[in-house]
Amino acid sequence: MKRLCAILLAVFLLPVFGAAQEPSPATPPAQASTPPENPPPPENQGFIAFVVFDASATGLGTVASATADFGYNFTPHLIGEGGLPIIFTRNPFSKVTTKDWRYVTLMADPYVDARYHTERYGLKVTSILTGTIPASNSLRIFSTGRVGVDWFNHVERDFGLGQGFLNFGVANGTVNRAIMPRPYSEDRPYQTLGIIADAEAGVNHTFFKRYTVGGSAYVLRPAGPQKVFSRFVAPDFPLGGDGNHNRFFDAAFETQGPSKIARDNGYSGWVQIGRIMNYGTLQFSYTQSVHYKLGTASVMLKVDLSSLFRSPSPESSSSP
């Protein structure tokens, strides 16, 4: 009887131990699903668009601009785009004796650019090549009357408490940068023509994921003959200011001379608020030009319109 019980116990336990020791069969490979005929573009690919509104005020006058930009994300690294700025100025050089200020609204040079971004060795690197197209001469729009070429580079690294960055570039004259604009270059009261290099070093600190404070020092170094075109002194009315502290743009519409007439250096500070209504970025900044002894207060609002050109994801479209 004991032997029979032992045999029966062994018969019942054998499948259990056998199943425990036997390796589980490999999961069969999943069948590849047929891709849709028109798959939506990935999040980092597709049409992009934004508008930028900014204004800069000095003791000499005010310059404001509105820029519309439209482009396409070809890859996660490469973007091509173009835009059109409109510039508004308020200056004290009125042609009418009964008015203290003169208001001028003119188009600036349309532009096209190619933007490349990559991340290597803990560095975020962005390089932007911009070309401006003179739609008319400098008497009819805010332009130098020549094709402009600007190469701008941004290198950034996160140090935990903040992000350090270095900007540097070279151009054949100062241009209106709508892509990654800097406080010292937002709505300048002048435009230059001639080889010029610029560099900026600074730091940003972001807190609560949407607020950023930062500061930087910058320098503009021209080479060779230069021309300076004022946005305050109109070409049709010769009245200008005194031009003190190397402010040639306050004395005449066009000034020609050696490289020093386009030189500048100074420092900037800013406060930025991101994710305004999920699409906007607001920045307040102040720039002190050491060379021109001129302080400039600026405000900028950037609104991202890319979502208008992209189809909603299936999840969001199916949700109530």
Image (cartoon, rainbow, N blue to C red):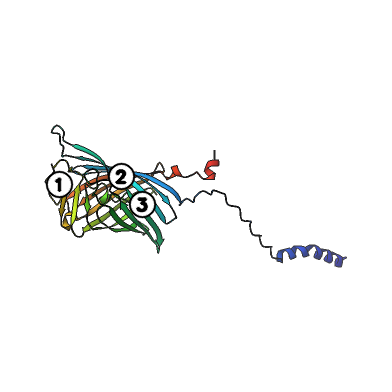
Q: Residue at x 37, y 54 (%)?
A: 114
On the picture, is 158 further left or further right than 318? Answer: left
Q: Is residue 123 visible?
A: yes
Secondary structure of residue under mark 3: strand
Q: Residue at x 16, y 33 (%)?
A: 99
The quarter of the picture where residue 66 lies is top left
- Label 2, on which residue? 85
Image position of 195 with respect to 61: above or below: below
Along the polypeptide, which appears first: circle 2 or circle 3?
2
Residue type, label 1:
Ala
Nearer to the camera, 189 or 193: 193
Nearer to the camera, 159 or 108: 108
Quadrant assignment for the C terminus? top right
Report how far apart the C-alphas of labels 1 and 2 lie in the structure.
Answer: 23 Å
Along the polypeptide, which appears first: circle 3 or circle 1?
3
Image position of 104 with respect to 78: above or below: above
- Label 1, on which residue? 252
Task: Classify 10 Å Cα crowding around label 1: few (below 14), some (14-19), many (20 and above).
Answer: many
Q: Residue at x 38, y 57 (%)?
A: 116
Q: Where residue 194 sits in the image (x, y, percent)?
A: 22, 56
Q: Is residue 290 visible?
A: no
Secondary structure of residue under mark 1: loop
Q: Where residue 277 sits in the image (x, y, percent)?
A: 40, 41
The quarter of the picture where residue 173 lies is bottom left
